Amino acid sequence: MLDTPDRPDDTAAQAVVASHRDTDTGELFGITELCREFGITLRTIRFYEDKGLLAPRRVNGARVYTRRDRARLALILRSKAIGASLAEIKHYLDLYGDNGEGRTQQLAYVVERTDLAIRELEAKRAGLDATLAELRLINETARRQLDGG
């Protein structure tokens, strides 16, 4: 369930975000704001925190997320949507480093993983195509027999 404004954690987070936000860049985000934006629950974000995928700042006890946290969350959700495991996602995110020094390693990892995924999916598609061809042949034969031919 999403936090509502009357919950202490959310109220504190909103106050901290409002007091630290640069109006031009929107540098900080509250947990409820991210939940709404990505259509996820507080529990989901906290789960990713527990797994070490997100590490928000704490200001007066409230979780405050940076643009980097927001970008990481977007990557986590996108990666989950294409079937990546949490371990793979964590490995990918950890490659980045503190200041992006691992970007080349991240890209190499993405190329390696997507090459593998593409090969696996192409093999599955070939298997499906063969099965479809066989089913069509069986269907055609059965229809001809029904039609008396």
Image (cartoon, rainbow, N blue to C red):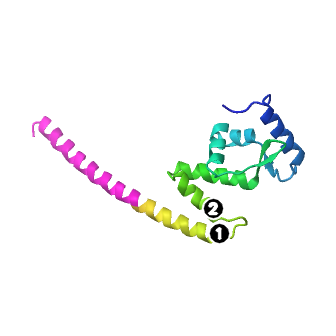
Say if 42 sits above or below 117 in the image.
Answer: above
* Residue for badge 1: 102
User: Residue at image x 55%, y 70%?
Assistant: 108
Quarter of the image where one finds residue 2: top right
**Amino acid type of the residue that numbered disc 1 sits on in the rendered structure:** Gly
Q: Earlier in the sequence, mark 2 or mark 1?
A: 2
Magenta: main secondary structure: helix
User: Residue at image x 78%, y 35%?
Assistant: 9
Q: Secondary structure at mark 1?
A: loop
For the residue pair 134 and 8, the one nearer the viewer reads as 8
Return the mark for residue 12.
Answer: none
Q: Which residues are magenta?
A: 120-149
* Residue for badge 2: 94
Residue 125 among magenta residues: yes
For the residue pair 24 and 35, the one nearer the viewer reads as 35
- How far across and down, in percent of the image, does residue 73 sit? 66, 50
Say if 95 sits above or below 25 in the image.
Answer: below
User: Residue at image x 49%, y 62%?
Assistant: 114
Q: Is residue 118 left or right of residue 37?
A: left
Quarter of the image where one finds residue 15: top right
Residue 51 visible here: yes
For the residue pair 12 and 116, the one nearer the viewer reads as 12
Per the model, the C-alpha gap separating discs 2 and 1 is 8 Å
User: Residue at image x 66%, y 31%?
Assistant: 1
Residue 41 visible here: no
- How far across and down, in percent of the image, does residue 13 sit? 81, 40
Circles 2 and 1: CB distance less than 8 Å?
Answer: yes
